[in-house]
Amino acid sequence: MAIARRTVLKINRNAFGQLCYMADDTTAYVGVVPVRAFPMSAPDAGISLVDLRGRELAWVAHLNELDREARTIIESELKRSEFMPEISAVRNVSSYAVPSRWKVDTDRGETEFVLKAEEDIRRLSAIRFLIAASNGIQFLIPDIRKLDKTSRKRLDRFL
């Protein structure tokens, strides 16, 4: 049985909280930013580390390839920079015609938003959906099967 080898990515935070990356040639880069290549369809695959000018410094094919420390740092930075609440329940929809006001529970608490058009609900896969609110915030439903029956019924009216 082969043991998967972990990639050691020389990444840490400096005293100012900035992300630092040490390249193989011992060049140090301060203020690097991890960027997902496919944030919706493959969030753990294709992570690029870019410098302040947007130039790619390193490529991570999949987060599972990294050692635990580097993976924790990158996941923490991605979570801090990305704001996409995940809907866990649809509590109320003001109308089944658009625009409509939605009351939802998310992983960040309860909130309300306005859905301007039915096209603002995008199917990412058979079970994943993205809802764009009128204020520009995007809400993710990672798995429609995990919603309660009432929430699914409310969402189905718009699909």
Image (spheres, helix red, strand yellow):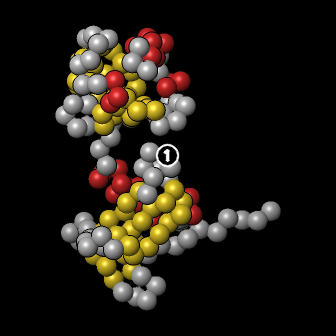
Which corner quadrant of the image does residue 11 belong to? bottom left
Seen in the picture, residue 39 relative to 59 is either above or below; the reply is above
Between residue 79 and residue 92, name the one nearer to us: 92
Q: Position of residue 69 (x, y in %)?
A: 46, 64
Look at the image and tell me in which quarter the N terminus lies. Answer: bottom right
User: Can residue 13 be seen from the camera position used here?
Assistant: no
Seen in the picture, residue 144 relative to 32 is either above or below; the reply is above
Seen in the picture, residue 114 relative to 132 is either above or below; the reply is above
Look at the image and tell me in which quarter the C terminus lies. Answer: top left
Q: Which residue is outermost to the right?
A: 1
Between residue 106 and residue 94, name the one nearer to us: 94
Q: Circle 1 sits on which residue? A: 41
* Identity of the residue drawn at 31% across and 22% down: 104
Q: Which amino acid type corresponds to the residue marked 1 in the rendered image?
A: Ser
Q: Position of residue 139 (x, y in %)?
A: 33, 34
User: Can residue 137 be seen from the camera position used here?
Assistant: yes
Q: Residues within 10 Å of mark 1 (few under 14, many from 20)?
A: few
* Identity of the residue drawn at 21% across and 31% down: 134
Q: Which residue is outermost to the bottom?
A: 25
* Identity of the residue drawn at 29% across and 13% down: 97
Q: Position of residue 118 (x, y in %)?
A: 34, 24
Which corner quadrant of the image does residue 126 belong to? top right
Using residue 114 as the reference point, say whether residue 4 is left or right of it.
right
Q: Position of residue 99 (x, y in %)?
A: 23, 19
Count of marks placed on residues: 1
SS class, disc 1: loop
* Identity of the residue drawn at 35% across and 28% down: 119
